[in-house]
Amino acid sequence: DIQKTMETVPSAFSIKARNPEKSIRIGDDNYVMAPGYGPPFIIEPSGEKRDATMADVQKFCKLVQTSKHLDFNSSMVVQPNDVPAGTAHLDILLATMRLTDKPIMGSSVSEAAAKDSLKLAEIIWGNTNEPVMISLVDSLSPLQYANEMIDS
């Protein structure tokens, strides 16, 4: 029963960052801010629209790291089109883990990506029972979920 399960969910939880001073608490009266998620295009100052690249991912990771307004980093701050789609999550996670010491989102684009996120997290944090990542599961309308989201 969904209601019974909801009663077991804590009112707040923490996500551990590589830099303990940047760990975050979600819930109670706390809120945290993250960058956008998944835009495939970049609009240059000139107005030119172009495909996002891994160089853009790296730039956005650096912006998140230096921002006093963003508390953690998205797992897909932009969708790079210059790396293979099947392994892009690995490139993005590596950039995120290398370029920021704030909490991060793991990838949930597929079951394999979710497992890869957990493996990479274990390399960085070791085998821990503390939450070190959060993720985003996209819902579809009306009241549906894509199979990839369920699998991850």
Image: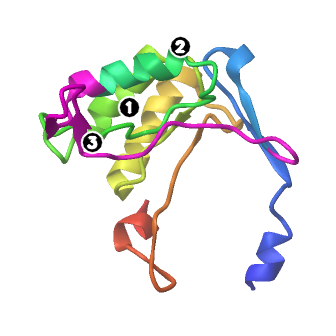
Identify the secondary structure beneath mark 3.
Answer: loop
**Mark 2 crowdedness (10 Å alpha carbons): few <14, some 14-19, many ≥20:** few
Label located before the other in sequence (2 or 1): 2
**Mark 3 crowdedness (10 Å alpha carbons): few <14, some 14-19, many ≥20:** many
Identify the secondary structure beneath mark 1.
Answer: helix
The residue stretch that appears in magenta: 27-56
Q: Residue at x 42, y 45 (%)?
A: 37
Q: CA distance from mark 2 to mark 1?
A: 18 Å
Give yes or no for residue 49 being in the magenta stretch. yes
45 left or right of 111?
A: left
Q: Quadrant of residue 46?
A: top left
Give yes or no for residue 125 being in the magenta stretch. no
The x, y position of residue 147, in whole percent, is: 36, 73
Q: Are marks 2 and 1 in contact (CB under 8 Å)?
A: no
The residue under label 1 is 93
The residue under label 3 is 79
35 left or right of 98?
A: right
Observer-nearest of 29 and 75: 29
Which-is-in-front pick, marks 2 and 3? 2
* Label number found at residue 66: 2
Label located before the other in sequence (2 or 3): 2
Q: CA distance from mark 2 to mark 3?
A: 21 Å
Quadrant containing the N terminus is bottom right
**Secondary structure character of the magenta stretch overall:** loop
Q: Amino acid at mark 3?
A: Gln
Observer-nearest of 40 and 14: 40
Q: Amino acid at mark 2?
A: Thr
Which-is-in-front pick, marks 2 and 1? 2
Q: Residue at x 49, y 36 (%)?
A: 35
Which-is-in-front pick, marks 1 and 3? 3
Q: Is residue 45 above or below residue 81?
A: above
